Image (cartoon, grey):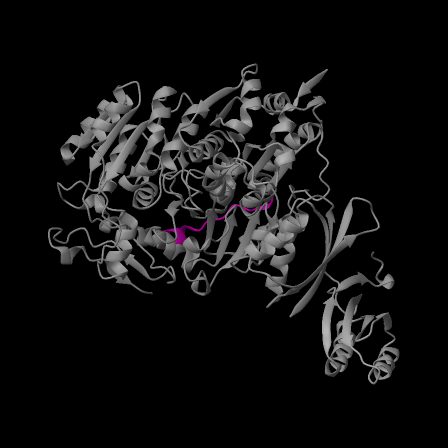
């Protein structure tokens, strides 16, 4: 089962290395990992999607994660009902005069955006949960995807939970 | 007043109460070695950096203080790695200071440059790369704090040469600011109450004491708990010494080479009270057959150990000493005579099988270990290596004294004993320190005999020479059809070698010379190396084969069998 963990970490050199090393050493499988600034200067925020085979396994991941000195907080209840998930993808798709309008129609349906147009391709930006991104990517595939960049999941607890 | 980074290192060590450093100089730490001269810090020069880390570890385990080692960049730092990993697996508090190439050269593959913070990432509790002298006071403070608090462990501080020579207005911080590091000290009262309740309901309790008891200095509290609730105490290998071996409630060690009655007690228990131990595979055997009838109370300072290997019914996270104090205030006096009688009946069977009861003139290692125990009256600090010698030491030296066994448990590092004993003897100059080591292990760090002599350390080194890498040979005998691949090993003439290094060398080849030679060795004031030529193919029993449950033991043969016949020596397999 996939588990979403949010971690606040001190923004020190090598922190990402420590997290990656921990997951590798302990044989935990990371599906995705995103990292960026948080609302507090000096604190970065990570969202990890980890493949856990049991509740005990999930607990181990969280506890081992907590042992890293530079990890200040782990939010482990970012379950789908309590949190919102988003992912961003950039898709460079082959586009000719004939196919361009069909692609734009798809982009509109998904409320995505075209951010670059060239002679033979278009680059599309889409934000949403993974399913939505998957769907658009699958629909664009027949046109010929030349380049695909996905950020992996970022997550935040919903406001109604009384937590950050 | 401004001082140099190198001086900050020394100032910090003095303020942290350090009195000795084990190390080896090199190009990238010369400024620190230069500063060292002006501080009241003893430096023990080892002959290989691995020994510096082991010696600091041995010092830490013998004294309870943080051990410190120094090494230069590159090969100096990489040579520390095995020692740091050893300390990491056994939760030993260590601060390793390494020099690094100047920060302008970092990442340029400079001479003797290696990414030691990267290399030691998975084997340190935490590590630092310091490129600016300004950061040193804070980093040194944090390093010692992290090494000694919570679950202790090694911390490495890698300092670039320009950070050592850079100047800084020195002020040693009074407090650390580590928002992500707040070890739980006090146990949760509700959980402790629950533990007391569970203990009260138990009829066949067993206390399982590990290294955490020693690390928390909780031997008194452990004894009080055991005597109050009238429960037998089993230790892990590193738990030896946390509870007196000759105490009527002590069952000794359990696990792969634990006593059969101790393993039976674990399997027959209705409650395991695990204290400062981590259910390693050497303790549990096949985990789904382990203590199936028992509830588990697990007391440990590291929450990640709870439920890692074995499901736990009542977890209590906190400092073992404080948790036991609270628990002792809540438990009721109990009487488990019936349970103890059952366990003691199993014990009699084991005693009949005891190798010491074999009538023989052979040089049996268990006999030698027991005679060492007699000779030093159980009062020595014993430092054992890894393999058969380690298991025989654990079985036949009856450790009543606290912190009296130092051995590499988790990593199982051959070559550990001699350098670790150097650290122990430096830390405890008034104690008698003995090394038990095989002919394989001694040759892994034999160069440290020179350190022993230079530092005038009165170590007694007992080499059990069976001309084999004995434990691997034992596995080959039992599980690989006696195909002795890579295990026969030759040795130098240890008596001549001792002479060359400048210590006394003795050799024992006959059983009746064991006792007089031990007596003589103790009468010699300086270091003594004794080579015991022991039986070549003797096995450590009992033994749980790898991957089997701890109920399936290869037992010692009954003592009354004809021990000249090889058939009579074959172990009795017992499955229950």
In the rendered image of this protein, does residue B568 appear above or below residue A134?
A: above
Residue B218 in view in this figure = no
Residue at image coords 59%, 52%: A21
Q: Quadrant of the N terminus of chain B?
A: top right
From the viewer's side, name the closer residue of B73 and B266. Answer: B73
Residue B297 in view in this figure = yes
Q: Position of residue B217 (x, y in %)?
A: 53, 35
From the viewer's side, name the closer residue of B193 and B5. Answer: B5
Q: Is residue B402 magenta?
A: no
Judge left or right: residue B160 versus residue B355.
right
**For residue B497, what is the image quadrant?**
top left
In the rendered image of this protein, does residue A78 appear above or below residue B299?
A: below
In the rendered image of this protein, does residue B511 appear above or below residue B560?
A: above
Residue at image coords 36%, 55%: B342
Q: Position of residue B26 (x, y in %)?
A: 49, 27
Q: Position of residue B385 (x, y in %)?
A: 35, 40
**For residue B464, what is the image quadrant?**
top left
Residue at image coords 40%, 36%: B405
Q: Quadrant of the C terminus of chain B?
A: bottom left
From the viewer's side, name the closer residue of B79 and B499. Answer: B79
From the viewer's side, name the closer residue of A42 and B76. Answer: B76
Question: Which residue is the extreme one toward the front?
Answer: A119
Q: Which residues are magenta?
A: B329-341
Judge left or right: residue B170 versus residue A114.
left
Q: Position of residue B267 (x, y in %)?
A: 41, 59
């Amino acid at each position: 089962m996939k588990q979403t963990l949010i971690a606040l970490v001190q923004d020190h050199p090598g922190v990402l290395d420590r997290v990656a090393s921990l997951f590798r050493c302990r044989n935990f499988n990371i599906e995705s990992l995103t990292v960026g600034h948080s609302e507090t200067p000096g604190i970065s925020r990570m969202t990890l999607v980890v493949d856990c085979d049991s509740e005990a396994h999930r607990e181990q991941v969280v506890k081992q994660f907590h042992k890293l000195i530079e990890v200040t907080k782990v939010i482990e209840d970012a379950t789908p009902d309590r949190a919102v998930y988003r992912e961003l993808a950039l898709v460079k798709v082959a586009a000719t005069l004939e196919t361009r309008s069909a692609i734009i129609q798809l982009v509109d349906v998904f409320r995505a955006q075209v951010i670059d147009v060239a002679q033979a391709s278009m680059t599309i930006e889409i934000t949403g949960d993974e399913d939505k991104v998957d769907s658009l990517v699958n629909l664009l595939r027949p046109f010929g995807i030349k380049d695909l960049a996905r950020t992996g999941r970022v997550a935040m607890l919903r406001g109604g939970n009384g937590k950050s | 007043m401004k001082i140099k980074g190198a001086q900050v290192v020394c100032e910090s060590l003095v303020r942290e109460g350090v009195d000795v450093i084990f190390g080896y100089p090199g190009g990238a730490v010369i400024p620190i070695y230069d500063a060292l001269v002006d501080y009241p810090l003893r430096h023990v020069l080892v002959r290989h950096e691995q020994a510096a880390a082991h010696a600091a570890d041995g010092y830490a385990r013998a004294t309870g203080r943080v051990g410190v080692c120094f090494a230069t960049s590159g090969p100096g730092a990489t040579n520390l790695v095995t020692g740091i990993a050893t300390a990491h697996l056994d939760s030993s508090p260590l601060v390793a200071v390494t020099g690094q190439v100047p920060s302008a050269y970092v990442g340029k593959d400079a001479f003797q440059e290696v990414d030691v913070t990267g290399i030691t990432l998975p084997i340190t509790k935490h590590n630092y790369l310091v490129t600016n002298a300004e950061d040193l006071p804070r980093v040194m403070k944090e390093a010692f704090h992290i090494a000694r608090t919570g679950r202790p462990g090694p911390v490495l501080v890698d300092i670039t040469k320009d950070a050592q020579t850079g100047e800084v207005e020195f002020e040693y911080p009074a407090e650390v600011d580590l928002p992500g590091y707040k070890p739980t000290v006090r146990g949760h009262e509700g959980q402790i109450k629950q533990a007391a309740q569970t203990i009260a309901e138990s009829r066949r309790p067993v206390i399982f004491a590990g290294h955490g008891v020693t690390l928390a200095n909780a031997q008194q509290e452990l004894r009080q708990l055991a005597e109050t609730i009238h429960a037998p105490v089993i230790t892990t290998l590193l738990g030896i010494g946390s509870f007196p071996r000759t105490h009527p409630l002590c069952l000794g060690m359990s696990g792969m080479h634990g006593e059969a009655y101790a393993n039976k007690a674990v399997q027959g228990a209705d409650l395991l009270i695990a204290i400062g131990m981590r259910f390693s595979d050497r303790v549990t055997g096949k985990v789904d057959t382990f203590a199936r009838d028992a509830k588990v109370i697990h007391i440990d300072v590291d929450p990640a150990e709870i439920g890692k290997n074995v499901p736990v019914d009542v977890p209590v996270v906190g400092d073992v000493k404080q948790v036991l104090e609270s628990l002792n205030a809540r438990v009721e006096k109990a009487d488990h005579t019936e349970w103890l009688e059952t366990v003691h009946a199993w014990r009699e069977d084991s005693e009949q099988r005891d190798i010491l009861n074999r009538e023989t003139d052979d040089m049996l290692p268990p006999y030698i270990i027991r005679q060492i125990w007699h000779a030093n009256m159980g009062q020595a600090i014993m430092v054992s290596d890894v393999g058969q010698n380690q298991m025989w030491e654990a079985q036949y030296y009856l450790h009543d004294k606290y912190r009296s066994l130092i051995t590499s448990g988790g990593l199982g590092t051959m070559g550990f004993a001699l350098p670790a004993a150097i650290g122990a003897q430096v830390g405890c100059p008034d104690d008698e320190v003995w090394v038990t080591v095989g002919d394989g292990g001694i040759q892994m760090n034999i160069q440290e005999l020179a350190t022993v002599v230079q530092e005038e350390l009165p170590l007694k080194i007992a080499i059990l020479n069976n001309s084999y890498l004995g434990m691997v040979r034992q596995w080959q005998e039992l599980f690989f059809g006696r195909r002795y691949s890579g295990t026969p090993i030759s040795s130098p003439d240890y008596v001549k070698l001792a002479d060359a290094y400048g210590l006394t060398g003795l050799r024992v080849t006959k059983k009746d010379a064991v006792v007089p030679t031990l007596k003589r060795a103790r009468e010699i004031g300086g270091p003594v190396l004794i080579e015991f030529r022991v039986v070549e193919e003797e096995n450590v029993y009992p033994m749980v084969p790898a991957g089997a449950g701890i109920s399936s033991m290869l037992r010692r043969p009954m003592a009354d069998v004809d021990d000249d016949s090889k058939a009579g020596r074959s172990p009795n397999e017992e499955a229950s």
